[in-house]
Image: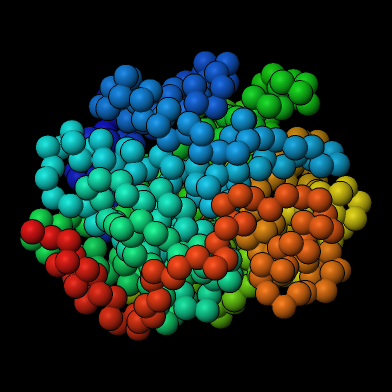
Amino acid sequence: MTNYISTRNAAIKVSSYKAILEGQAPDGGLYVPEDIDLIKLNYHDVIKHDFKGMAKVIWNRFFPDYGKDVISELVEKSYNNKFSNGKITPLTKVGNDFILELYYGPTAAFKDIALSALPNLMTRAREMNSFTDEILILAATSGDTGSAALHGFSDVPGTNIIVFYPYGGVSETQRLQMITASGANTCACAVKGNFDDAQSGVKKIFNDISKPAKGVFLSSANSINIGRLVPQIVYYFSAYKQLLETKSIKDGSKVNFIVPTGNFGNIMAGYFAFQMGLPVNKLICASNSNDVLTEFFETGHYDRKRTFHRTTSPSMDILVSSNLERLLHYICGAEHTAEYMKTLTEKGEYQITTDELAKLKSVFIGISATDTQGSEAIGRVYQNRNYLMDTHTAIAWSCLEKFKDKAWAYSENGEDAEYTNVVLSTASPYKFCDSVLTAIGADLEFSEQANMIKCQELTGVPIPAGLADIFGKEIYHPDVIQTSDMEEYVVNYAKSIGV
Ligand SMILES: *Cc1c(COP(=O)(O)O)cnc(C)c1O
């Protein structure tokens, strides 16, 4: 039976539902499956099912203590009638490559796939623990987690959620999605800092206070929660299934996945898919000009002491990628992981060993692209292929082009290796409409709403239903605070919902 241990200490061991309920391990580490061999399977036994069937097989592997019947019920509840595409994550061919579209959920970003699931996993974990405390979820967001989490947890009994987002650091659409969230148990608050400030503020609250008020229990909806990560594994299998169905690959051939990366949650799910046995060649970690991971995968040196760039792909504007710690655990072991994380906190950098770097490089490649390169990619792919991408997908696309230009450099024998490439598309172009319009050479209108309508008229790509109705909604969450006031804010909120 798969148990969960802290990335920093194997002696901290809990069942899967405890890991989901707690979010983060008490020593500051993240929960990972204790024995990665226990999650291995024959991928044919996954891809013979539809999306929900695949989810059931995969969730059962990771969360065995829920039981098969409960998992079935939770998967149905998570994905019934929530996604506007029947395949949930459809694959589209663009030129000779493929794009896996992950944005057909209620808030039009890939985070919906996990955040439709997490509240269901969490409320069931609460029942299994005979828990009576109210759960208070804290989430830091670079934009998309916020709206997806506020939507996913909206009016879920026994749960409450506060989302912190960087003031001025999210797109207008993302901001409107959050401040108009209407669930009575939801709250969004801007903090005067960037995403990393918001995230370390949340982490600090977890470390400082375990109980913010009587009858209230803190947990996390960020991808540090394993219940958030596992539902994302499913679409890697879904991509492979669709490649086989369209006869685009031979069964067993290996595929490259190019993943627009911020907090390393999405691509970490890809690593789990690879560990489970999915035929993966390389996982390409695409970054914007916040290229800390690009340097890391090249040199093994992680250095957060660099200028923070605000880019047009704000969900990737991150210098401390939390989920990388999970990968470190499997590559470097608990002892080194604990040491590196300590050095990161104290010195802002760490260096892994040569052997560890070689292990990383056998699967991962880090590539980065600038705003300008991303914008050019949107324009080019739209002109040449009549396909419209958002700014995050465009960074990944641009990284794919760079990879193909020097694919020889990455193949073992120095010859040009031909692999099938799947770019993960993480958001609808309408979430970042002004940047997308500019990229395709159109002038901007006077408002975000007018931009969306113009984009629809120009491109024929329909505005997602969940985005069409955010304008003119009532604003429920106007708060803006200093980072230093986050703890007090949480305690006050907790008191209002506690006993
Ligand atoms: C969150 C997000 C990312 C980054 O995903 P991680 O799991 O944090 O690496 C990329 N693109 C979009 C649109 C996102 O919302």
> Is residue 443 visible to us here?
yes
Observer-nearest of 449 and 99? 449
Q: Quick one: quadrant of the N terminus?
A: top left
Where residue 374 appears, x then y in whole percent?
75, 63
Quadrant of ligand 1: it is bottom right
Q: Is residue 253 above or below residue 333?
A: above
> Is residue 38 visible to us here?
no
Where residue 379 appears, x then y in whole percent?
84, 61
Q: Who's the residue at 44% across and 80% down the image?
A: 193
Q: Is residue 72 above or below residue 466?
A: above
Direction from residue 286 to residue 49 in the image, left or right = left
The colouring scheme, among rainbow, by chain, secondary structure or one colour, is: rainbow
Q: Who's the residue at 36% across and 30% down the image?
A: 74
Q: Who's the residue at 40% across and 39% down the image?
A: 117
Observer-nearest of 492 and 458? 458
- The tally of labels here is 0
Where residue 239 appears, x then y in whole percent?
64, 32
Quarter of the image where one finds residue 236: top right
Q: Residue furthest right?
A: 384
Direction from residue 438 to residue 51 in the image, left or right = left
Q: Quick one: quadrant of the C terminus?
A: bottom left
Where residue 65 appears, x then y in whole percent?
25, 27
Q: Who's the residue at 57% across and 52% down the image?
A: 466
Q: Is residue 447 above or below residue 50?
A: below
